[in-house]
Image (cartoon, coloured by chain):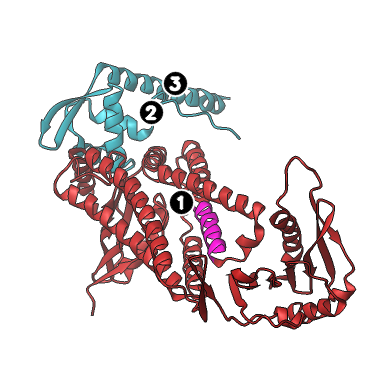
Amino acid sequence: MTHLPRVKFHTLTEQMFYTLLCLKEECYGMDILDRVPAMTNQRVNVGSGTLYTLLEQFLDAEMIRETKIEGRRRSYILTEKGSEMLAKECERLNAQLADYHRIFDREEHS
Amino acid sequence: MKDFKRCFVLFSFYDRTGIENYLEKQAENGWMLDRITALGWQFKRIEPKKIHFSVVYFAKASAFDPEPSEAQLTFQDFCEHTGWHLAASNAQMQIFYNEDEQPTPIETDALLEVEAIHTSVKKSLLPSYYLFVGCGILQALLFFWRFSLDPISVLASNNNLFTGICWILMLTIPFAGIISYFSWYRRANLAAKRDGSFVATKGHPRSKCVILVFLILMFVFLLLSFADSRTSLIAVLAIAVVLGLSAVILGISKWMKRMKLSAKINRNITFVLSLVVPFVFSITLIFFVIATVLSSPSAKVPVDTYEFKGQTFEVYGDTLPLTIEDLIETEYDEYSYEMHTQNKSIFLEEDAATQRPRWDALTQPRLDYSITRIKAPFLYNLCKKALLNDFAHNYGRPVPEVSGWEKHISIDTAPWGANEAYQLMLADEMQMRFLLCYDDCIVEIDFKQDWQLTTEQMKTVAEKLGK
């Protein structure tokens, strides 16, 4: 069985999705570690190492930008590109959900 | 009761799973990792308890950093925020611990974690492995080349065998390491992409331990096998100096870190020192060995000396298994009897003997012979073939333009009491040089002058040398 490589940010993992979601408003990187579990009712946790790497990669891909540097504390916010990617991911998820409902609702009606 | 202990560990750099399990077990036994040094991992005593450990790889870090970079400290801040405290670090490897019952792991995305490990391994582990494999291949090729040219001198020397086996093992460890690493990386990458799972790492510390113990035992055996204490001393000194020089280079690198020199300067200086110092050491060692061997008196003490044409010659009185007097009656009594144990190993032993007249009596008969004792029967045919080849070439002084200049002719074995017997023919002329194959030894014997061999003399040779 072969697996297609995951094209970077073509689809977002849950951790990427919620990290970007947190950055709709300016936020310290470290605070995302608390916000994601709170936002998802503890369903999703982002590890500190994973978050650090994601923030670096999002910065490189210009999906977020730095807004403030206070010593080692840095805050970030979503860029236009990041917003677009988040919206695209939402559309994809919505389409998935719609497909699910179309199939199962049809079964219930028949 | 000791509050600190030091352990020598053999984990692979990327063996995250193995290191975490090991450290968790140590904590349960009341030992907490304190720091990682070149001389092992230091632990401090704590209350035995269940502690979670996480080994993560920060690719931007370097073993030559004078202090953690801002980025590394930020990374550590992130970890602190979720209850992970830094226990120790070694280059890119960062070891954190967490006393919470169910902490959120530092790495929650297997694919990102595998890539972080891979970036760090490419930066630190693989270059050293490639260097070792390159040196190992070169040395192994040299070993086999020497073996193909002269298998007896290789097999008859514990030193040669030890060096050859060491290099083959030195080649095996990084080679196996590279294969093992890429095999894990391939599987880990696939699993992370497939279902986000992390494939546990395996560093094979037990196999490494076995190889290390084997190497140490072999070295001890080598030291014990040296006939003279001077050679053993040189070998021990060489090892001690290599360890000492490594400590000096590490010390200089550490000092540069303390002096806050940049990682780049530190790395470059350490790299140059690692090349120059062993080179200077090798040259010094070679000169030292030559000087020691040349200046120190020979282990053999001559029984007499004599002058001939302004030069002094030594006369020895070694006991030879076969002498000219055993073969013929002679009134000449100023022979020098010289017995040399050329080489001795677990497989073979080579002895050579010479009975020579003085330079002012060269008309007297002279006798030269060597005995190759084969302790491992499976090597008999290989030795015979090599000796037959060597026999013709050593004595025949082949002239390349003339084919068939020298060859060995099979002769009657009965008078020699041998299993096989050969006589050298040089340019169609039979020489008084013989190669005699007995049950567990092969004798090469060279009768100088116009010696008329009798059946009785052949029988004496068989009795004295063929046992």
**Badge nearest the viewer, 2 or 3:** 2
Labels in figure, total: 3
CA gap between label 1 and label 2 equals: 27 Å
Q: Is residue B249 left or right of residue B321?
A: left
Q: Nearer the viewer, residue B427 or B440?
A: B427
- Residue wearing tag 1: B201
Please tell me whether residue B176 is drawn above or below residue A103 in the rendered image.
below
Is residue B57 one of those drawn in magenta?
no
The chain whose colour is cyan is A
Q: Earlier in the sequence, mark 2 or mark 3?
A: 2
List x then y, in percent, for residue B101.
29, 59
Binning the other alpha carbons within 10 Å of mark 3 as few (below 14), some (14 to 19) or many (20 upward) gives: few
Q: Secondary structure at mark 2?
A: loop
Q: Chain of mark 1?
A: B
Amino acid type for the residue under numbered disc 3: Ala
| Percent of width and height locating residue B59 | 32, 40
Can you identify the residue that label 3 sits on? A95
- Residue A12: which disc? 2
Q: Same chain for the residues at labels 2 and 3, yes or no?
A: yes
